[in-house]
Image (cartoon, rainbow, N blue to C red):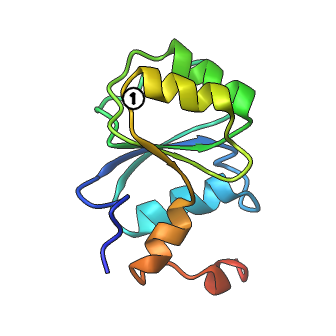
Amino acid sequence: MESIVLKGKKNFVVLGKTEDETKYAYKIKKALLDNGYNVIAIPEDADAIDKVAFDIDLIDFCINPVKGLELLKASGKKISYAVIQPGAGSNEIEDALFERGIPFINGCVLRELEKEGRYSFEDSNHR
């Protein structure tokens, strides 16, 4: 079954600790790359997301909510959809997304891939 969250999307940005193999931001980045998506990882110490060379189909917040909000507010980049991972959300992020007309869910990209049979949490725990 195709996930409605992922359907038609190909250009992803993952915000968070994307270089640390023990962190979910890394696992999300890797799973998306393994499934053929175009992915840019933005580490938590980055100062902007506007350097991304493409329009963002989906931005995944897997980052401290204060830093995520800062990056979002500083960006003028076109963003079509957002996923706010558990622990990465705040009312302020939701308000900022709403004000920009960016639809979002509070959820998990890995769970969406799992629904499609393209990711297994069991396998990821052994990496």
Seen from the viewer's position, the closer of residues 13 and 107 is 107
Residue type at numbered disc 1: Val
Residue beneath the point at 58% across and 22% down? 71
Residue beneath the point at 39% across and 29% down? 52
Q: Mark 1 packing: few (<14 Cα in 10 Å), some, or many (20+)?
A: some
Look at the image and tell me whether residue 49 can be seen: no
Seen from the viewer's position, the closer of residues 52 and 108 is 108
Residue beneath the point at 53% across and 56% down? 29
Look at the image and tell me whether residue 96 can be seen: yes
Displayed quadrant of residue 54: top left
The residue indicated by pointer 1 is 52
Quarter of the C terminus within the rendering = bottom right
Q: Which element carries disc 1, helix, strand or loop?
A: loop
Residue beneath the point at 65% across and 77% down? 124
The x and y percentages for residue 34 are 43, 68
The x and y percentages for residue 31 are 50, 66
The x and y percentages for residue 92 are 64, 25
